[in-house]
Amino acid sequence: MKLPVVNAQGKELRSLEVDDSVFGIEPNHAVLHQAFVTQRNNQRAGTANTKTRGMVQGSTRKVRMQKYTGRARHGSIRAPIYVGGGIVFGPQPRDFGLAINKKMKRLAIRSALSGKVADGQLIVIDELTFKSPKTKEMLGILRKVGIERS
């Protein structure tokens, strides 16, 4: 399979021979989805946290006598029924990390590249050189090559 190589002005310079086993396979959408979900889950922080009744600052003393007051029985001031008490089943820090097999990861990358080639969305640029790192220059090059959106 051949891919066109363009310069920074968008003119085609030559063709680049690429391997069909990487750029010419039928995309496996299920593996692509699994790799995407894994990638996104591994970026999650999972740092949401609340205090339970055991973690809230406060005394462990009984609020009032159990009997002879005519009022409801209560144990701890840190109970969830009180304002400022602990949270029941609130979020705790956890790891959302997932893993996929090496071969599946490689297949997902090959599927993504093959899908982009099949849709005509893969552009090989010969050389990118900048006088200074300016976004305006990069946007100009991308427009000349024919890339409007990512």
Image (cartoon, rainbow, N blue to C red):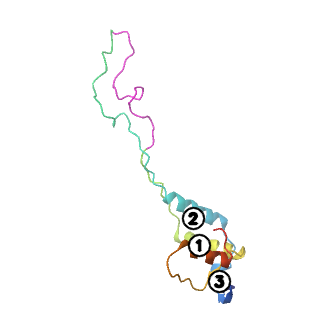
Quadrant placement of the N terminus: bottom right
- Evaluate if marks 1 and 2 touch, with contact meaning CB atoms under 8 Å apart: yes
Q: Which mark is residue 35?
A: 2
Label 1 sits on residue: 109
Pointer 3 or 1: first along the chain = 3
134 horizontally vs 125: left or right: left
Quadrant placement of the C terminus: bottom right
Q: Which mark is residue 19?
A: none
Compared to 59, does 11 lie above or below? below
Q: Regarding mark 3 in the picture, which secondary structure is present there? A: loop
In the depicted view, which residue is nearer to us: 116 or 128?
A: 128
In the depicted view, which residue is nearer to us: 39 or 144?
A: 144
Pointer 1 or 2: first along the chain = 2
Compared to 11, does 59 lie above or below? above
Q: Regarding mark 2 in the picture, which secondary structure is present there? A: helix
Name the residue located 56 percent from the left edge and 82 percent from the top edge.
128
**CA distance for labels 2 and 3:** 35 Å
Compared to 141, does 48 lie above or below? above
- Residue 115 in the image: x percent, y percent? 68, 72
Compared to 135, does 61 lie above or below? above
- Evaluate if marks 2 and 3 touch, with contact meaning CB atoms under 8 Å apart: no
**CA distance for labels 1 and 2:** 9 Å
In the depicted view, which residue is nearer to us: 14 or 10?
A: 10
What residue span does the magenta drawing correspond to? Answer: 69-91
Q: Nearer the viewer, mark 3 or mark 1?
A: 3
Instruction: Give, as a three-letter code, the residue at label 2.
Output: Ala
Label 3 sits on residue: 9
